[in-house]
Amino acid sequence: MTDRLSFLAAPLARDAGVPLRVQVHSRILDGIRTGALTPGSMIPTETEIGRLLGVSRTVVREALMLLDEDGFIVSRRGIGRFVADAVPEAGLERLRPLEDLLSMPGSVLELRRTQGELQETTSTYIAEELAIPADSAAWFFETVVLRDGQPIALSQEHLPADAPVASLSAGETALSALLDRLGSGVVRFTAGLLGESRAAPLDADPGEPVLIVTQTAKLDGRPIYLAKHMLRAGAGQLSVRQPGQ
């Protein structure tokens, strides 16, 4: 093993209660953060990462998919995956709740909450975005969005434990409950795949392509909101206004 890949040498914790894909994601992200994987350098192959960490290619693929979504790596068809040259630029700044983005005249939009609880933060990325310790508790809300009875999107929202969302209604997203306090934020759009864990609530194929809307926001200068919304093809066109429009 080369020194460049030595950060992959330590075995993963199989009984830590943390999904393997999250552990792989965090391990590779640590390699990027510490400079073991430098900007523009090629990421090891799925097979190589899987062999070093003792996990399947499916687990590695989902971890790399999330890193791609978050802007830490980029994929070049037929060549491989590379560490991004720079942190992604801020995107559109007008925050709108998912139920607002997906509503259509003449259709019935329903939010079906599948998870809503305080749980230990197991992802380095989530902890960094919310500026909280990696092992602290945070709110996690997972919501399936249905239009006329058909599941068209999956929303996964993360907030610090002291965020004012304990009494969140089942018929609204956390962003909807907080929007009047937040003002502007950052919205990014990326193309991706559902993956195993996110396909289950939608009863969909893990390989289904989706549009991923990532939203982040601060309250009084403090990070308080992180969300990823996976929009299926049936969600239709998305209308988003720039600030000042």
Image (cartoon, rainbow, N blue to C red):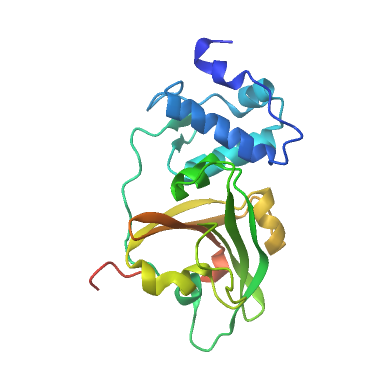
Counting from the top left corner in percent of width and height, residue 37 is at 45, 23
Up-down: is 173 above or below 214? below
In this picture, residue 178 sits left or right of residue 87: right
User: Which part of the image, by quadrant, shows the C terminus?
Assistant: bottom left
In this picture, residue 112 sits left or right of residue 14: left
- List the single residue furthest toward the bottom: 106
Up-down: is 237 above or below 43? below
Residue at coordinates 57% horizontally, 26% vertically from top-left?
Answer: 45
Counting from the top left corner in percent of width and height, residue 99 is at 51, 75
In this picture, residue 229 sits left or right of residue 143: left
Of the pair 180 and 236, the residue shown nearer to us: 180
Q: Quadrant of residue 95?
A: bottom left
Residue at coordinates 48% horizontally, 52% vertically from top-left?
Answer: 191
Residue at coordinates 54% horizontally, 17% vertically from top-left?
Answer: 5
Up-down: is 135 above or below 232? above
User: Which part of the image, by quadrant, shows the N terminus?
Assistant: top right
- List the single residue furthest toward the top: 2
**Can you see residue 239?**
no
- List the single residue furthest toward the front: 162
Counting from the top left corner in percent of width and height, residue 234 is at 57, 69
Q: Quadrant of residue 153?
A: bottom right
Of the pair 144 and 82, the residue shown nearer to us: 144
**Can you see residue 50?**
yes
- List the single residue furthest toward the left: 244
Up-down: is 13 above or below 179? above
Q: How many marks?
A: 0
Counting from the top left corner in percent of width and height, residue 97 is at 46, 71
